[in-house]
């Protein structure tokens, strides 16, 4: 319940998934992902199917919870702005690693 509060859904703990919006469902997923304090968290397209405002909220929560938990975050995304916020970028094309670079967080990322 504490994590639901952190993601802004404290009062929605007894709702079914169908009673939540896509963004609310994604925030519940974040709370669930961090509930057991994992050492590594894999997030595959965490902002897929969300509008820009909801995506921004979810990304901020993801990085905030990640910092607090000290979790290693492995993030899969096609969103270059999101990738630019990570410490390391591994680009894969056709199943082959084409680049593996330490990222200057916030730097411009090119394809």
Image (cartoon, rainbow, N blue to C red):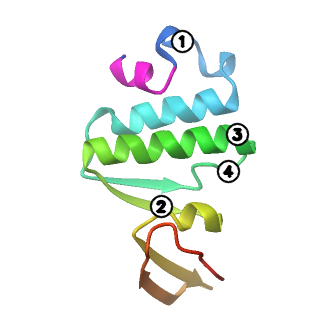
- Cα distance, mark 2 to mark 3? 20 Å
- Cα distance, mark 4 to mark 3? 12 Å
Disc 2 vs disc 3: which is toward the camera?
Answer: 3
Specify the quadrant that holds the N terminus: top left
- Cα distance, mark 4 to mark 1? 22 Å
Reading the image, the residue beneath label 2 is 75
Q: In the rendered view, would you say 2 is above or below 71?
A: above
Specify which label sits upstream in the sequence, 3 or 1.
1
Q: Residue at x 32, y 47 (%)?
A: 67
Q: Does the magenta portion include 110?
A: no
Specify which label sits upstream in the sequence, 2 or 1.
1
- Cα distance, mark 2 to mark 4? 12 Å
Q: In the rendered view, would you say 71 is above or below 75?
A: above
Residue 107 in the image: state x and y as whole percent: 53, 73
Label 2: element kind: strand
Reading the image, the residue beneath label 4 is 48
Q: Residue at x 54, y 68 (%)?
A: 84
Specify which label sits upstream in the sequence, 4 or 1.
1
Label 3: element kind: helix
Label 1: element kind: helix
Mark 4 burial class by Cα count in 10 Å: few <14, some 14-19, many 20+: few
What residue span does the magenta drawing correspond to? 2-8
Mark 2 burial class by Cα count in 10 Å: few <14, some 14-19, many 20+: some
Residue 54 in the image: state x and y as whole percent: 67, 37
Q: Quadrant of residue 42?
A: bottom left
Q: Please report contact status of discs 2 and 3: CB closer than 8 Å, yes or no.
A: no
Residue 61 in the image: state x and y as whole percent: 47, 39
Label 4: element kind: loop
Specify which label sits upstream in the sequence, 4 or 3.
4
Q: Residue at x 45, y 68 (%)?
A: 105
Reading the image, the residue beneath label 3 is 53
Reading the image, the residue beneath label 1 is 12
């Amino acid at each position: 319940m504490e994590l639901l509060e952190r993601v802004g859904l404290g009062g929605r703990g007894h709702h079914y998934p169908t009673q939540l919006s896509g963004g609310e469902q994604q925030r519940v997923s974040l709370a669930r992902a961090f509930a057991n304090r994992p050492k590594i968290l894999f997030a595959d397209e965490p902002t897929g199917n969300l509008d820009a405002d909801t995506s921004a909220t979810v990304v901020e929560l993801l990085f905030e919870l990640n910092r607090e938990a000290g979790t290693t975050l492995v993030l899969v995304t096609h969103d270059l702005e999101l990738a630019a916020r990570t410490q390391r970028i591994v680009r894969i094309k056709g199943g082959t690693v084409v680049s593996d670079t330490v990222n200057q967080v916030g730097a411009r990322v090119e394809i």
